[in-house]
Each structure stands twice: as C-alpha cells, then as structure tokens.
Image (cartoon, rainbow, N blue to C red):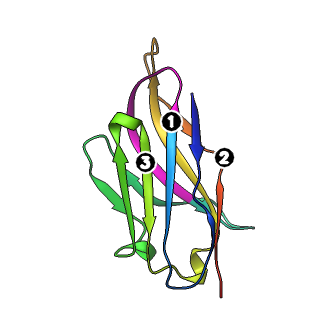
C-alpha cells in the first residue's frame, strides 16, 4: 500500500492550493483519511480529518479556510487550502487508516510529504 501526495508549492498570502493524496495497492477498505503538517523543530499536527462517512474535523487555525474531502472511488483525499497565511508554511503529510485485503486490523499509512510555502 502506498500514499502519493502532491500539489504543494509556493503561493502568495491569500492564495489557494489543492493537495491530493491517492492510496494504491492491495486495499480492502479505507477508514479515516487525514492531513497533518510539520515545521522544523515542532511536532507534526493534525490539520484535518475525514472519516468513511464523510464527517470532518479541523484544527482551529484552519477552520473556515481549509476543506478536506475524499473520493472513495479513487481512494483519494483532498485538502483545499484557501486564504493561505505565512503560518501555514509547512510540510504537509497525508495519512489513511487502511484495511488491506486479507488483514484483520487496519493500519495507518503515510504519504511522503509535500512542501507548502506561503510567502510574498
């Protein structure tokens, strides 16, 4: 099982980016999917999460600006980031709790990280 994240880059304050993350491999089902971010010297923090039923939760600092969604047919989770601020600069990681075909319990998988830089 692999998670492939993309969509990062350099954007001006107030701009937007969309981060997709696709899961592939021997997947039976996917439970929660999420996006985390990390800056140097700090712990990785949860940005947004979406469960298999579509319920979402967000860290307070991104509420009203970021939207997480998923396409179950494509095993893909998206993070739409609007009104970006310099403090959103970080490496963004996607995660997914995946039940592999033939397994009993799901495991958490991580994408490779994508850099988002918000700067003028």
Q: Position of residue 117 (x, y in %)?
A: 65, 73
> Mark 2 — residue?
112
Mark 1 crowd level (few <14, some 14–19, many ≥20, 10 Å Cα):
many
* Magenta span: 24-36
**Tag 3 near tag 1, CB within 8 Å:** no
Q: Which one is earlier in the sequence, the residue at label 1 or at label 2? A: 1
Q: Position of residue 111 (x, y in %)?
A: 60, 44
> Mark 3 — residue?
77
Q: Which one is earlier in the sequence, the residue at label 3 or at label 1? A: 1
Disc 2 versus disc 3: distance between alpha carbons?
A: 14 Å
Q: Magenta segment, principal secondary structure?
A: strand
| Residue sitting at x 48%, y 40% | 96
Q: SS at mark 3?
A: strand
| Residue sitting at x 45%, y 76% | 61
Disc 1 versus disc 2: distance between alpha carbons?
A: 12 Å
Whether the magenta-drawn stretch holds residue 88 is answered as: no
Residue 64 vertical placement versus 1 (above, below): below
Q: Which one is earlier in the sequence, the residue at label 2 or at label 3? A: 3
Asked whether 77 or 40 is in front, the reply is 77
Residue 20 shown left or right of residue 56 in the figure? right
Q: Which mark is residue 23?
A: 1
Q: SS at mark 1?
A: strand
Whether the magenta-drawn stretch holds residue 26 is answered as: yes
């Amino acid at each position: 099982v692999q998670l492939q994240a993309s969509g990062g880059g350099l954007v001006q304050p107030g701009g937007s980016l969309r981060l997709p993350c696709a899961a592939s491999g021997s997947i039976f089902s996917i439970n929660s999917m999420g996006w985390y971010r990390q800056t140097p010297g700090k712990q990785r923090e949860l940005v947004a999460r979406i469960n298999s039923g579509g319920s979402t939760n967000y860290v307070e600092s991104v509420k009203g600006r970021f939207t997480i969604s998923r396409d179950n047919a494509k095993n893909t989770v998206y993070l739409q980031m609007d009104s970006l601020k310099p403090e959103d600069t970080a490496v963004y990681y996607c995660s997914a709790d995946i039940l592999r075909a033939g397994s009993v319990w799901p495991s958490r998988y991580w994408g490779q990280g994508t850099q988002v830089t918000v700067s003028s």
